[in-house]
Each structure stands twice: as structure tokens, then as C-alpha cells.
Image: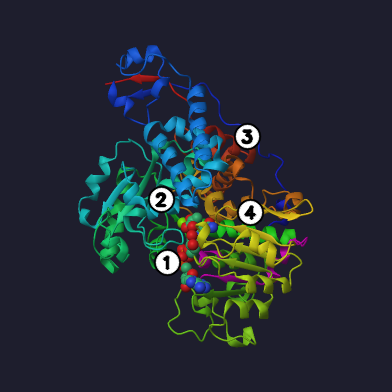
Amino acid sequence: MWNVARFAASSLRRPRSFSTAIPGPCIVHKRGADILHDPWFNKDTGFPLTERDRLGLRGLLPPRVISFDQQYARFMESYRSLEKNTQGQPNSVVSLAKWRILNRLHDRNETLYYRVLIDNIKDFAPIIYTPTVGLVCQNYSGLFRRPRGMYFSAKDKGEMMSMIYNWPAQQVDMIVLTDGSRILGLGDLGVQGIGITIGKLDMYVAAAGINPQKILPVMLDVGTNNQKLLEDRLYLGLRQPRLEGEEYLSIVDEFMEAVFTRWPKAIVQFEDFQMKWAFETLQRYRKRFCMFNDDIQGTAGVALAGLLGTVRAQGRPLSDFVNQKIVVVGAGSAGLGVLNVAVQAVSRMSGKNETAVKNQFFLLDKDGLITKERRNIDTAAAPFAKGLKDVEGLREGASLTEVVKKLKPHVLLGLSGVGGIFNEEVLKAMQESDSTKPAIFAMSNPTMNAECTAADAFKYTGENIVFASGSPFENVDLGNGKVGHVNQANNMYLFPGIGLGTLLSGARFITDEMLQAASECLASYMTDEEIQKGILYPSVNSIRHITAEVGAAVLRAAVAEGLAEGHGDVGPRELRHMSKEETVEYITRYMWFPVYNPLVHEK
Ligand SMILES: NC(=O)C1=CN([C@@H]2O[C@H](COP(=O)(O)OP(=O)(O)OC[C@H]3O[C@@H](n4cnc5c(N)ncnc54)[C@H](O)[C@@H]3O)[C@@H](O)[C@H]2O)C=CC1
Ligand SMILES: CC(=O)C(=O)O
Ligand SMILES: [Mg+2]
């Protein structure tokens, strides 16, 4: 049951302090130029003279030693001058130029890369993550210079168990896996989808402090049905249609067996799989392996936290959630994930069973309102199909405008992948919403796929709304000194904490209770004052702090369920005895923070 009292904001809020312990030595098994060419260990001109001697680097670098701070300042200067020099150029050109300069640093010196990323997360998240990562995936084959992560293809069948040992790191904790079949709202991008796994794992390092030596982006290339890519002479993936059915599943099975054989304690995040495989693989693996599907489960938790926030923004008690009319546009993995957890929440709040509490939710897909009259309805969407008598005056397949005009919903939530479908007419119809503060969630990514822009939402529905989008928009100037606040309703507020909390709990599975704890934690993070201003989610600048809190909530849920086996030296007994504050502190201390460690060579 949702405990309304828990929604008082935590007093432990947002100090931007990171672990600053004196760096311990780092063992390295190589010497000389091999170290300079290894971004995990490379310090460029930052190697002190003693280390240059010890590691055989003398003469391989210019003589002057440059401090980390100087290197940092030098990089930021070049980034800022790139910004200046590209002013006025098309957005895509500027964004790709920014991505390139960051990517070159990533390829060369990971410590410096992650430090600038963490310190400038608000500026850099839109480059390494949505929206620019979408553009990067679309152009991946042309942009490709160096591999990152691992590529398992349909041609590797039977070889994966040995291939997994080609990865150079001894330990991997976090894997993000895609088959490239639905990258953001950009469709099937085949092998080029690896970009999204890299972006997500960068967020794991920045937000959750997972050590970059323990992450692994993985592309499962089973072909592509994107004709343009198949005909592109630069395309780097398999030139064949996607495998289907048992052939497809046998590839994913083999990969999962290989991963968990080498790293039994790893966590695999499934990312951007087309809907049929997203649901099927989640069902297939969630009780066998430590895995979750970010688009179904991470998105659902973030959306639910936002939906509860909109109830508070209306000045109503949380228990009023059961009376909110919510229209979800997009019946895919994300939209259905949101509906499923929203129904669970209403059921918990009202004490009624889940079948009895679906009346307030309405679902549309590309063919309009989904009713029981729909032919060939997808089994995952079927529970949300309305009987015609429940939507009087509406028909099967009714358009979004018809639905909004008729139902006057409190919330309009888009996860359709279709840019601009919350058009002027739809947004104006939301003025008649039954809510005192209507909510518009345009959650599709990247920016051009958002159901509407922030400016249009405030312009056409009015100033007194709550607005959230999946990719970032600037706050909107409403005139008279007033600001329309833009929230970023993106699963990045949860997936890093889900991964980190699970890792440190040592749980072998990720349960609904652990995911619910993550969502509740995010929902209770904001103060009433912030919520009144329409601020539903923390600033991206506090992502490490919210991630520590979410991670602690997940870990404690695993402890409560008796699933926590511990991690490293911290066993289940110690975890059981930690208070909430101690758990947050433990998690914060665990987080990796980029500093140059002294390198010690060992043969
Ligand atoms: N903000 C966030 O954290 C997240 C955002 N997303 C975004 O959600 C979008 C959808 O993702 P999935 O559900 O995985 O995709 P999906 O392909 O499984 O589902 C898309 C759904 O939208 C429907 N649709 C297509 N055109 C439509 C139209 N004109 N009107 C109404 N519905 C329409 C389709 O019928 C389908 O039901 C993507 O753009 C993705 O980037 C996904 C996960 C997280
Ligand atoms: C954010 C995310 O996971 C998506 O758009 O698919
Ligand atoms: Mg995704």
C-alpha cells in the first residue's frame, strides 16, 4: 500500500559531494606505449615523472607534466571554443561535433572523460545520451573509428561461450544489451544501435558511479529489416533480415548463458528491443537471470513517479490518483509498462483487484482508441481495451482529438515515438481537462519524436499545466517573469539506481518489489514547494544523489524480501543491520569517482 506520509521530501537532500578518498594504487599488467594506448589507464601528459620511470614511459611523452586540473581546463576550453565556432550551424552538425570531441576523449583517457561528464552532466547528457545519441546511432557506420563494447552476431552461434572470454576485464558488473530493433523512436537501426548501450552505460558511470572497467555495452546483431541500411555500402552489421522465432531466441539464450557463466553476478539491462521481444525476453529470463527491461520497467517507474507528482501538483492527496483519467498514447513496450504499474498502484491504493481498477486508463495506438471491438488485438494490450459502453460517444479507433475532447483527461501521456501528434487541436482540447492542472507527458525520444514541444504545450493548453518530455527542452518563458517548468521524464532517473542497488544487494533477480521501491523513492524525492511549481523530477545535476537514494531503496527492498546475498566484503547480515541513512552512505561511498590513481606495474 502506498504510504502517503512517506511523500514528505527527504531531509537528506542533494549535497553535491562525491567521494574524495585518497586514491589507492591501481595494478596494471602492461608497460610503455601499451599503457598510453589504453584509455582505462592513460593519463596523457598527466603521468608524473616517477611513474614514467616505473612504467617505461620516459621519452614517450613531452617532458612537461600537466596536472589533472590543467588537462580538465584545456579540454573544457576546446569544448567551449567549438561551441563558439559552430554557432549558427545546423543543430545536427553542432551536436555531432560535440559528440565527436567527447568521444575522442572517451577513446583516449577515460578518467578525464568521466570527470568532465560528471561535472557537466546537464550540458553533456544531451550529447552522450538522448537526443544526440539517436543521431549518433543513425550515423554510426559512417562515424565508426574504434570499436567499443562487444558484438555478438547470428554468425557467432555456438561460439559465444568462448567469445565472452575475449573481453579484457576480469569482472563485469553491468551490461546493457540491445538487438537494435527499436532504437529510441528511430526504429530498426541494426548494429548501429550499439550507440544507445554506450550512452546508457555512460549514465551508469556518471549517475551510479559504476567503475567503467566493469561495464560492457553489447550488440546482438541478428540482422536488420531496415532496407536503407541493408543497401548502405558503409553499413557495418550483418546484411540479412532479422532472425525470428526460435532462431532468434536461441541466439539470446546462448548469449545469456555465456555472460552468466563468466560473470555470475552481472546484471543485464535489456534496452530498445522491439515490443514482442521486449516482453518475451523479460518473461523468459527474469526468474533465471539478474536482468530487467529498461523500456518496460524503468520507464514505468519514472512515469508513475511523475503521475503521482501531478496529483500532488493539483493540491490533492495522493489517494486521489485512483480518480485521475489518464490517456496513454502508444501501446508498445513503454506505454504498456506504464499502464501495468499504474494499475498495480491504483490496486494497492484502493484495495481493489487489478481487473477492477482499469476504468480510468485509456489506450491508443496507431489505429486510435483501443476497444474490445479491435481485431487481432495484441495480448499485452488486450487488458486495457475498453468496452464501447465504457467510452460512450466514442468508437473503436477514435482519433486522439476525439478521445481528448470527449474524456477531458487529467493526463495525456505519449509513448508513441511519433513527433508532433499532440498537435494544436489536441493541446487546445486539453484546456477542457477535468484537472485543475492538466498534465502533458511527451515522453518519446529523441527530441524530434516528442509528441509535442514544451513551447507548444504551454502555448496551446495554457500556463497552468505540468509538462514533461523524454528528451530535454529549455524551460519556457511565459512572460511577466513567469516560467513554464520543463521536466525530463526519462528512465535515466531510475535505471542507474536499479542496477546499482541490485548489484550491491547481491540479489540474483530483480523483483517487482525492488522496482516499486525505486519508483516510490523517486516519487517522494521532491518537496511540496517544488511540486507546486510544476517540478516533478530532480535536476539532472543531482543525478548522483537521486541515484544513491534509489539504489538504497532497491537494496533495502531486496533485503526485505530476503534476496540480498551481499557484495564483496559486505554480507547479507551487514546489509540487514544498515539503517536507511547508512545504506545511502554505503552506496555513496561505493560509487567510483574519476581521479588519477598511482599505477603499479605487475607482470
Ligand atoms: N522517456 C523515456 O524514458 C522513454 C521513452 N521511450 C520512447 O517511447 C517511444 C515508444 O517506445 P516503445 O513503446 O518501446 O515502442 P513500440 O514500438 O513498442 O510502441 C510504439 C507504439 O506507438 C503506437 N503508435 C505509433 N504511431 C502512433 C500514432 N500515430 N498514434 C498513436 N499511437 C501510435 C504503436 O502502435 C505502438 O503501440 C519511443 O520513442 C521511445 O524513445 C521509451 C522508453 C523510455
Ligand atoms: C529513454 C529510452 O530508454 C528510450 O527512449 O528508449
Ligand atoms: Mg530505451
> In the rendering, at what x and y percent does residue 423 appear?
60, 70
Comes first in the chain, label 2 or label 4:
2
Image position of 131 (left or right of 48): right
Q: Is residue 188 magenta?
A: no
Comes first in the chain, label 1 or label 3:
3
Q: Secondary structure at mark 2?
A: helix
The picture quadrant where one finds residue 120 is: top right
Of badges 2 and 1, the one in the foreground is 2
- The CA span between labels 1 and 3 is 38 Å
What residue is pinned by disc 1?
275
Query: Compared with residue 62, is residue 267 higher up or lower down, i.e. above or below?
Result: below
Comparing 13 with 91, the one in front is 91
Name the residue located 48 percent from the left edge and 32 percent from the top edge: 78
Q: Which residues are magenta?
A: 314-338
Q: Amino acid at mark 2?
A: Val
What residue is pinned by disc 3?
16
Q: Amino acid at mark 4?
A: Asn
- The CA span between labels 4 and 3 is 20 Å
- The CA span between labels 2 and 1 is 23 Å
Image position of 311 (left or right of 279): right
Comes first in the chain, label 4 or label 3:
3
- Asked whether mark 1 and ligand 1 are closer than 8 Å, the reply comes as yes
What residue is pinned by disc 4?
487
Query: Compared with residue 534, is residue 148 higher up or lower down, i.e. above or below?
Result: above
- The CA span between labels 2 and 3 is 30 Å
